[in-house]
Structure formats: C-alpha cells, structure tokens
Image: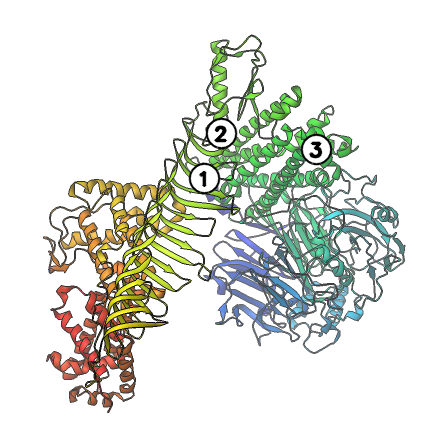
Amino acid sequence: MDPVKEESSRERGLLHLWRGYSSSVTPERVLLSRPVLQAALGISHGILLAEGGLVYSFGDLTWRQGLRVPPTYPLLESVLSGQCVVSVAAGSFHCGAVTREGAVYMWGENSSGQCGLSERGLVPDASLVSMVDSEAVPPQIIRILEVTCGEQHTLALSTQHEVWAWGSGCQLGLVTSVFPVWRPQKVEHLAGRHVVQVACGGYHSLALVRRFPAQDSQFPRPTATDKCSQCNQLLFSMVDQEDHVIISHSHYCPLGIELADSKPGSCSRSRQASPARQASQSRQASPARQASLAQRHRASACPLSQTVTEDSLTLASHSSGDLLTLVSHVPGQCLNGDLPDQDQPSTLTPYLLPQSTDDTTMASSLSCSLLENYTGALVMEHTLALTGRAASASPFEVNTPLGIGSTSRLCDSSKSEGCIPVAGLCEALSGPVMAYRKTNQEVRLCMEEDSLQGKKCSSLTDILLEEVIEGSRRHSLPPLLSHASPELPGRRSARSRPNVPRKEEVVESLPSLNTEVWSWGRGQEGQLGHGDQLPRLQPLCIKSLNGEEVVKVAAGTHHSLALSAQCQVKTQSPSHSQFPYPIMSKGLRVWDLAAGQSHSVFLADGDCCQPILCYSGQQVSMSRVTEVNRSVCLMGYISSVYGGGQSCLAQADLNVMGFISALHELAAADRKYYCRLRDVNKRVVSPLLKKESVCTVLGQTSSLLFQSLASSYSRLCHLTGQHSVSLTAFLHTDRDVKGLVILKHANTFLDMYKEYCGSVGNFLVMGGFQALMKPSCFGKKFEVLRQLSESSEDKVPLLDLLVLLFYSPMQHIHEYARLLLKLATCFDVSTVEYQRLQEGCSKYEALSLSLGRKRKEAETTNQFWRTYSGKTTDVLRNPQRRLVYESSNKSLTLQNAGRFSVNWFILFNDALIHAQVRVTTPEESFTLIASSAQEKAKWLRAINQAVEAVLTGEGSGPGVPAVSRTASYIFYKDLRLKDASYSGRWLSGKPHGKGIMKWPDGRKFTGTFKQGLEDGYGDGIMPNKILNKSDRYQGHWRDGKMHGFGTYRYATGQVYEGSFHENIRQGHGMLSSGKLIGSSSSVFVGQWLQDKKMGYGVFDDITRGEKYMGLWSDDQRQGSGVVVTQFGLYYEGTFSDNKMMGTGLLVSDDDTAFEGEFSEDWTPNGKGYLSMSNGDSIEGLFSGEWTSGLKITGTYMKPNLYEPDKKQSTRGELGRLAVSPEQKWKAVFSECWSRLGCEAPGQPEERMRAWENIAVTLTTGRRDSPELLSRSQSRVLEKLEVIPQHTGPVTTGGYDVIQRYLTKACETPLHPLGGLLETLVTVYRITYIGVGSNRRLLQQAVEEIRSYLIRIFQLVRFLFPDLPDEGGVIHPDPKGSSETDHHGTGFQYDRLLLPRLYPPLFTLYALDKEREEEVYWDCVLRLNKQPDLGLLAFLGVLPSTKNACFASAVKTLQQISTTFTPSDKLQVIQRTFEELNQEVQALLEGNFLLSMDDLLPLFLYVVLRARMRNLAAEVSLIEDLMDPYLQHGELGLMFTTLKACCFQIQQEKTT
C-alpha cells in the first residue's frame, strides 16, 4: 500500500469536541478506532459516521431511558451495522441516517412526527422510513441523498434533487393544515427546481437551489394587477414549452394567511414538548433559558396581525424604475458589527466591548442596495448609521476581505468612500428627492409623489416583491421551464447598458455558483431573511442573496448563515438576543461554517496553510468573535466543523508526509486567487465595461476586443470560483488525487487560459491598454491600480501596472504546477497517483512557458507597431498577427533587385511582407538572397517556425513544417478560382484534402479536393440569379465536376437523386417535382442518358393520378408501357411520341376490356375486340371517344344467353404487351456491375479486381461521409473488411460464412450489393404503391421479383463461383457430423428482399383475392359461432378427439401473418401440423399416426378457429414464390392441405 494511504487511514478523521469558548477551554478528543467521515450535533447529543458505514452516538440519549454516553467513548448503533450508511444528521432530539442505496433511517423523539414513523412517541432504535411517492402511477420508491433535522421536523433531499418533509410546523413548506405529518411528503413549491442542499433550523428551513440561465419568452407577461393582494405573487404562472405555453392559476399564498386562524393542527397550534425533551432541557439550560424556551413553546402561533407591530420599514421607488431597499439588522449570535455612534458611520472593528441588552437605543447597520434592473446584480452599496431597534432584515455581509465589497468604484464620479449620508444617496439616484426621518422604533423613506398608500398587506416583502419581480427573474427552474416572474412591461431603464457577459457553468460537473437561497418557516427572529418577521408556509426566494454565489447554507436554532464562493458569510440575526454583535476580523477567508443553538463556528484560511477556527455567539467569559488558536495546532489540519446545542466539533487530519498540508495549501491558494479575480473584476473590468466613454476612446475594433477580453476574464473567474469550491469539497471526501478537477478537466483549464491569454494579447497588440490610460476612462483613480497590483516598486509606470494586472492570472498556472509537484512528492514514483500528478504538473508548466512566450510576442509586436506607426503599417495591423522577424538592418535583399528597390522584409506569423506588399501565395514563387550564410539560416528558421506556429499553434518546434497543412487563401490569378477564398488542407501549393471554397458570386463547395479540383464527396451550392435562390448538389465529384451518385436540389423545387456523369444526369436516377399537394407534382425514377429520360422508367403523375411504367426515349414515352389511373383504368401497349399509339389493351374497373388499335390516349381507332363485364363481346372496327360515343362496325356476341352463370374472361392475357421483367431496371444492375469494375456481367478474370473495388468503396465511404453512417453501420463495415475464404466446393460451414457476409453486405448501402438492394426496394415501392396498387399488376409484380432474384444470384455467383446452381445440393463438412445435405439456391436472397417488398406485394395479392376473401370471411364468422364440440361434430372429426380444442395449434397457425417469405410461412404450417399431431397422439395414448386424410378435418377446425384475414392472398403468395424443390415434399403436402382447407371454406354452403 502507498505510504500516504496507509498512514492517512490511521491519522485522518480525528474529532475534537468542546462546549462554548473561554480562555481555558480545551477541545476533548473523541476516541474511535476508525476514521470519522461525518458528524452531527443536536441539543445534547451527537452522532458520528465512521469508515465502513458504522454509526456511533454520544451524549444524552433521552429516547433510550435517559442513557448518557461520554463523548470519549461513543456508542455503536448496532441496528445500522451492515447498512452501509453514507451520511448522518442530528436534530434537537432525534437523528437520521442515509444508506448508499438511498434509504432513510430515523430514531429519537417522535412526538411531532419528526422521525416519520406514525403512532410512536419515542423511537429508541434506528427504523426505516418509508420513502414512497404515492402520487406517481405506479408508486415509486424515492432514493435520498441526504437528510437534515430541526426541532420538530426533518427534510430530505432526493436523488432527483427534490425536497421531502415530515414532522410539524410551517417550516415543512407543505400545503397542509393538519399536523403532525407522519409520512414524508414532497415540497411541491420547490418541484422542478434543482436543489443542491437543505438545512433545518429550530423552526425554519433553508434550501440552496441551482439557478439556470434565463430564457426569454415570446409570450406577453402578466401585468402588475395579476398579483395576490396578500403575498404580491403572480396569480397566473406561465411555463414555456417547445411549441406551447402552459398557463396555470394554481396560486398558493406563501405568507400563510391560514396562520391568522388558530385552527387545530395548524402551524399556529400550540404544541407541548415531550417528557424526554423537557427533561433534557431542564438539565442543560439555565432558569432564564428554561423560561425563554417555555415561552417560545407557548407562543408558537404566528398570526399576521402580530408580526409587524414592533418594527416596520417602508420602501419608496423613484420614477426611473430602479429600486431602493432599506434593511435593518439587530444584534444576535450571528456575525455583524455594532456601530458605536448612532448617527455617524463607522468602520467595523474586529473586537467590540460588551454592550447591555436593555431597551436603550442601540446602533444598527442599514444596508442600502440599488438593484440593477432585470439582472439582480448589486451596483451600489452604502452604509447608513441610524438609531432604533428594527426588525430582522435581509442577509448582510459579515466577512469583507481587503478590497472585496468596497464601495469605491474605479469610474465613480462620487468622492465618497465606504459610507455616505442619506442626502448624498438621494442625490446619487435619479428621480424625485427623498428624505428620511428617525424615530425610536421606525425608519422610513418617503416620496411625495408616491407614498405607497393603499397597500393591503403590512409586510415589507409585499412591497419589495412588486418591484423586484420586474428586475430579477427566477433562474432556478430548468432551462425549458422559465419561471413566471418576468419583467413587467414598460419598467426597464431607458439608459442603455453594455452587454455584460453572463455567467455560465464552464464545467457542468463542478459545483454551481449560480445559486439562490429559499427559506420558509417561522420568522419572529428574522431568520428567514426576507426583511420582515412574517412566517412563510411555503419556500420563498431570498432575493438579496441572488448573485452572491452562495455555495453552502447553515441554520441554527434561531439564525441562518450563508457562505459564498468569495469566502464571505451572509447572515440573518434574531430580534431578541442576550448577546451583542460579534464580528470577524477583516481579510479572513471563511470556507466552512456551522450553526448551533446560540453560536456559530467558522473555518478560515490563516497566514500559513493550516486553517484557523473562529467562534461567534454565546461565550463563557468573552463577548467578541474569537479565533480559537489555542488548540488548533494540537488538533492538526481541520477539514470540517460542526455545531449543535452549545457544542462545537472539529474534524481534523494529521499531516502525513506533507500530503494534507499540500492539499490545504492548494485549496487556500485557489480561494485567495479567486477573491483577487473577483476584486479586479469588480473594481476594474466591470466599471470599464459599463462606462460609455470607453467605447468612444477605444474605437470599434478595440471595443470588441475589450468585450471579448472581459468575457474571457468573466469565464476564467467563474471557472476558478467553481474550482475553489470543488477543492473545499475535496477536503471533505476521501481525497483521491485522481479526482482533482485540475487533473480530470485539465484540458478545460488549459483551453480557458489559452483563450484568455490570447484575448489579452490581441487587446495589447491593438494598443487597447494605451487607450484605457486616457483620463476619460480611468479618471483620477489610478491609485486603484497600485492597490490591486502586486508589484512592490513605486516607480512602475501605470501602463505597465495595468498590463501586469491583466496578465497576472498567468502566474497562477505556475502555482498549479508547483503545488501538483509538491503533491506528487508525497507518493511513490511507481504509483498511479504520482504519474497523474507529474503529468498534470508537466502540462501546466508547459502552458506557463508557452503563454510566457506568447506574452513576449504580443509585447514585441505592440512595440513594433508603436515604433513604426503610420497609415502603411496600420493596414497590416490586426489582433491575431504577431511579429516574428524583420530586416530593418538590410540583412536580406531581393535577387535581381533594382538600385532603388526597398529591401525591408517583415515576417509575421501569417505573412511575409516585402516593401509593404504581401508576396507569399500559392500562385507565385520568388527567390531571396541573404547577405551571409548565417542570415540565410536565421531567415529560413524564422520562416519555417512561423509556418509551424500557424499550423500547430506553437512556434518553438524544430522549424520543419508538415508537407500537408491547413491554411486559408484568396486566389487572384486562376481563371476558374479567381477571387475565390479557400480554407482547408493543402499539398504542394494546391488544395488537397477536405476544405471549403467560396466564390464572390455566392458559389460554395465544401468537401474533398484533389490537386486543386473537387474530387470525392462534397457539397456544392450554385446560386440561381433568376429565381434568387440556389441550386445545391450533395454527392460525389471527379476532376472538378459532378460525377457519381448524388442529390441535386434545384432552385425550382425539383430534386434529383441518382447518377451523374461530368455534370449531367446519366444512369439511374429519381426526379421529384413539386409537393404531394402541389399543382404539378410528379416523380420519375428510371434511366437517364445525356440529361434525358432514356430506357425503362416509372413516371408517377400525382396531380393527374396516373402512373406510367414503360420505355422512354428523349424524354418521351416510346415503346411498350403500362398506364394505371386512380379510377381503376389499366392500359398496356405501345406508345409513340408520348401517346398511346398502336396495339394495346384497355381494362376498366368493372372488367370491361378493349384490345385493339389506338391513335390517341385512351382513344380506339381500328380493329379491336371489346368484352364486357357480363360476358358479352363485340369484334370489329372502332372509332371515336368513350365519353362522346364509339362508332362500331362489327359482330356482337352473347355466349352466356343460355348459361347466365358462366362468364367469359378477357381474350388477351395481362402483361403480354408490357415490358418484360428482364428489361426493367437494367441501369440499376449495370451500375452495380460498374462499381465492381466490370463493364458487363463479369468474367472470372475480373473477380479479383471486383473485390479490390469493394474494399476501396467501403474505405472511401467511411472516410468521406462518416457523419452519414450510424454506429451499427460502422460496425458492419468493420466486419466486411474480412473476405470469406474457402477452397473447393462449398460445404454447409462455408455456406454459413458466405451467408453471414452477404447478410452484412446487404445491411449497408456503401457495399455494392447493399446499394443495389436499397435501390431495388425503392423502385419497387414507387412502382406498386399509390396508384400502382392495381390488382391487374399482380402478375407483373411477381415476375419482377423473380427477375430480381435471378440477376442478384448472378452477382453472388460471380463473387463466390463455388456456390451451386439454383436448387443445387450443399454437402456437410467432412469433419463433421450428422448434418444432412442442404438444398438451396446458393443464397436465400429472398429473406432480405421480400420483407422490404412485402407491403406493396401483399396489397396486390389482397386486392386480387378480394372477392374470395369476402366469401371466406363470411363463412368463418358463421362457423365460429358454434361451440367447439358442435364445430368438431359438424366437420366429422373422430369421436376420440372431440374433447380437444387444439389451442396451441391455433396460436401457431396465426403466426403465418407475421412472416414475410414463403419458406418462413411454410415453417409455420409445419409447426402447426406438429402441434396438432402431438395433441392427437396424447389423446389416443399411443404412437398411432393419423393419415393426412384423417388430419384434414382437424386442420380445417384449426384454420377456422385461427380466424386469419386474407388467407387466400397468403396461399397465393406462397404458391407463386415458393422454391420448386419444395412442392413435392412434405412441406408441399402440408401447404396443399392448407390450400384445400381455404377452398373448402369458400365452398361451404349455408345450412
């Protein structure tokens, strides 16, 4: 085991306990054999979580018959052993624990239901709490992350980041008036929000909620009149969805009006303490304290009429829409400072003298915050010293490090520092003049024009909400659920503000800094932080903490604490307290805190890396905040503090091999660094960004660069804040260094610093820092730079200080590298931890050196531009350009230069400049002559390094740039590419590889180039100036032209998808025109030649409802063809000049047919034979039109005169005049042969070339269009890289290998066979769907499929010549086994083809057998009305088998409708007979086999009970497409039986 891990397992998790504070207090060591991972304290007890998930208790365990356990020897909670507990919590007199599986165990006092177990006053042992969401359907078990306990209630945070509560009191936040709540219930007011932490006070609750970025809605916002008259919240809420808005009016008043009525069981109901609690309180509290506690229990009711009579505070708004908030603070156990003078402001001091607690006038601090409209950010802070004891107020800042939180602004014109009088404050605000007056109990701001009269609610929050809602939106809902508290219309400030970059979570896995705090419960002591003493039944957001980056909250019995990422503590103080205001020393960075009954304890950074403890609240002999330094060194390195009752608990670790100290040093350094970044951002960056004169001074380019710099600085600051918080949390975990964020997300940090350094360098190069030094930007406040600068020299120029200030974050990268190296020395060099830390150290050190070089380059370039300033050089000046080398000393000259030529060369990182002319282009070359070999080497190295820096981003390499590179260029000589800009890969001075070419006329190509020409897959856009739209082609190119398969979308709306040859359509393709409901919608799929329709094709005229399937020539229908219409007309015959001319056959929907000569579309002209649906016929000469009348000269015949039931069919057979199946889609198969490298059906010598072409096709397809392939297709391509190998005749084993390969090949369109199959499926569906669903096309559809199979098998036999012929025999493997010979067609391609063609094919079968289906189905319905025995008797089944129902056989036969190929359907029939035979044998109790004649009635019964629709169509499909060798075997006999049953059912007479 590693030394650090071995030692730390014995020396970590050490606990020290003490009570209160005095000069003689000595922390008491809690002895455990295992390290302690977590602790919690109640009023008089504590609970510990040790390694291994064991839980221990100590103190007064009143729920166990008054058992007292000393802290030095805690008691093991044996019930929880083996439950793997991960967190614990302690309330006043009860405890909780959470297991790894998310289960909750509670024990202790349960008189108020705080243990979640009904009908039990005391719970002596840990018991499982039922966490079930009963409202879910079905009910779901809730998994819990953590629990927290209060006096009479418990809160739980689920894995879904929802809050669940149980117990008693308004602090539950539930919509109920019946208490106790015995079962956990969800706090619905926080549903949908991402809660990250919860905390329970005595009678109040806190929740830390993550805020999500705001999303503006396009819908109108509710007006101010749509609000509750009591709580001032919106009566209607709107939630933005993707395509609609949800408006809800389910408003519930959060102020809890029900509290005014003292109903039984409500929150205002008086509750008596249990005997156990009374006994514990009597032992530990003084008489005065006991009286106070008793009084609080008696007066637990909190009606609105009694909450604001003591103090009040009124708010006035001015006309600009901004908001002025006055809040007051009252002394208590929280952190704040007393002001010694009543009327004059004073600086808060670390130590104050004790003050009396009588009713004399006490000084209080008033914080005035001007809320910036909409964003909620604080833009002005002042302090007013006023007299009077006021009610509790909004959270105030108690820890103010040097420089942070100062009211001094870099660009403020005000001369005030820190505090200003109210008159000065009024002058600073626009609008009517405000005045103030002081009384003993009241502080009020008045405004003459609007005195806020007529307010129905006496709560200050009521007044605050109405105005704050317009300036601060709720951001804690998920991004798609924008909260319905929007900005009111017409309230935004008219003054334009700069676009301040919004904070965003750089790394989602890091702790969020965009948080807000919600509170609810009792508020008599002001612990809710809403500026009043009102209770809240439901959670309400503390608006004054928005934007404060709160990362942790803690709740004491009557006070609340919030810790921000800036290591500042925000608190709410009680209005009744026996203790004065304590305050912490300035400059302390607090990073952990805890709250007890009447005290708070803090963990802060000290002067060294060892943390220090600070205590505030009830003390034994002192009345000030005290640093607990007496025993800190003896404790070790403290990582966590806990508070509860009157006790404090510290968790510490001993420094083993310097590992713990290195971790604390890393965390403290990052916290200090973040505070500094925030200070600079607050006092320099933000004021400059908001100052309007800065844009004028900088100009447009530099202004944009400064905004980019400010945005990068803000993101860097935010990432650092997240990291500092994560390091603090890291100290509380197992401290596995592999989980350090700067190691796991090293690339994020490196990229962020690179981006920021680039922004600073770009701004420096463009002279932005020199411009900022003008008086209109900084004014006279240059002393701020001296305060923020870390330089100790007084004579450093202010410009250098400003540049140094913005480059200061670069120094922290070296600090990361140093501390990582320090951590690495704590591990053995062979461990994984050492390697990770060493690797991280190398990365950060390399980045530090690289950024140092980039800084030097920027400074050198800036100096160059300042030295050679002028219009000529300003043209070359841009932010990204850096100087590499320049020849001002005449060290480089041009060959054959003239006498007066200029020999000044300037080498930048992206260009070589000669006499202010850029000469480095791929279209030119020139020769330079150096004055010496040394100068030549310098210039060559400088040029190569400049090229390498552009290619790789680093200029410190060997100076040998790659031959193939990525660059951008604008052509100016090449006629084809003139003025075109190219960005992409190059080779030998020409575009080669992937790139983008743009022409000035709007043409654009994105794809692959080869030797300067488009070659491979690409996307081309060609503008159409007439239609003001663009044509677009996506497909393959060759030699700069469209060649191969692609899709062309015309500006007219037409879409062609098919083959191209040198920019024209040639080969197989599909052209779509218009839309389905358009006026000219049509689809053509077929063969093209020289951009015209030629050969076989299908034209679907969607507008006219006609479909043509036949031959074409020069875009005209020419030759044999078939036409079907939506009205049921069918024509087959010859076409000429796009018309029906010559011999043809016309059949109508009622089976009337005419076969003869045609001269126009649908117009007979000449000899013909007309047969009518009733069997009559006419033969002769025909002329005229059908609609206007036919002229007939001929013979009329009525052969059915004496036999009316006998009808004569059409004399000609359908399909006789149509295109033969072998002539269809020849272009499709030709293209497949062409992809294999064969001009015609291949010869044996071309087989090896075919396999090579397949490999090239698959490789280029994966390379050129990886985004078009799914993950499964990519895996299929990998498997196709292995070609099946075999020698000699194909055996069953080799056949299986070949079959698997062909199956995979057909699954990807990149393989020639897969592309062929996909194309055939497409053309078949286009042919036989829609209008093509005509029953007279059935025979042609079947013959077409047979033709597919024959031609496909020809391709397969070419690739695998050893396969037998169709119907041949495949012998088993020689080694093998008992396998019999296999008959097949070489490869069963129908299994892949038929399932895709099945829908249109079976539709044709169903239409053809429609009449037989009606007769069959009527008989099935009639016969199935009989019971089983009756139907069996009717069918003449043997008596011995009449008791069977043959259910399994019926179920098996029904599966025939779920199969697609004839072979699969025959397998279903075979399994049906097997099921039937097994059941019959079981009934006959012997091995007697029934003959097929005996099984026929039973099988007929099974068919009837199966109730299969379209059985006649199924039978016809099997008969037409089944393999010939199966017709005379066992399967053929079984199929004949099914066919006979179908015929028998159709012929069954009604009896």
Check if mark 3's residue and mark 1's residue have beta carbons within 8 Å: no
Circle 1 sits in a helix, a strand or a loop, which is it?
strand
What residue appears at the point 87 percent right and 50 percent down from the top-left corner? 342
Q: Is residue 1459 visible?
A: no
Is residue 148 among what the camera can see? yes
The disc, 3 or 2, on the residue closer to the chain's N-terminal end is 3
Density class for disc 3 (Cα within 10 Å; few <14, some 14-19, many ≥20) is many
Query: Quick check: 646 left or right of 118?
Result: right
Relative side of 406 to 501, left or right: right
Q: Name the residue under label 1.
A: 1005
| Quarter of image, res 1198 | bottom left
The CA distance from mark 1 to mark 2 is 15 Å
In the image, residue 293 lies at what x, y percent? 73, 67
Q: Name the residue under label 2.
A: 971
Q: Which mark is residue 698?
A: 3
Quarter assignment of residue 783: top right
SS type, badge 3 = helix
How far apart are the alpha carbons under marks 3 and 2?
A: 34 Å
- Mark 1 and mark 2 lie on one chain; the one further toward the N terminus is 2
Q: Tell me residue 397's x, y (percent).
A: 73, 49
- Looking at the image, is 900 positioned above or below residue 1461? above
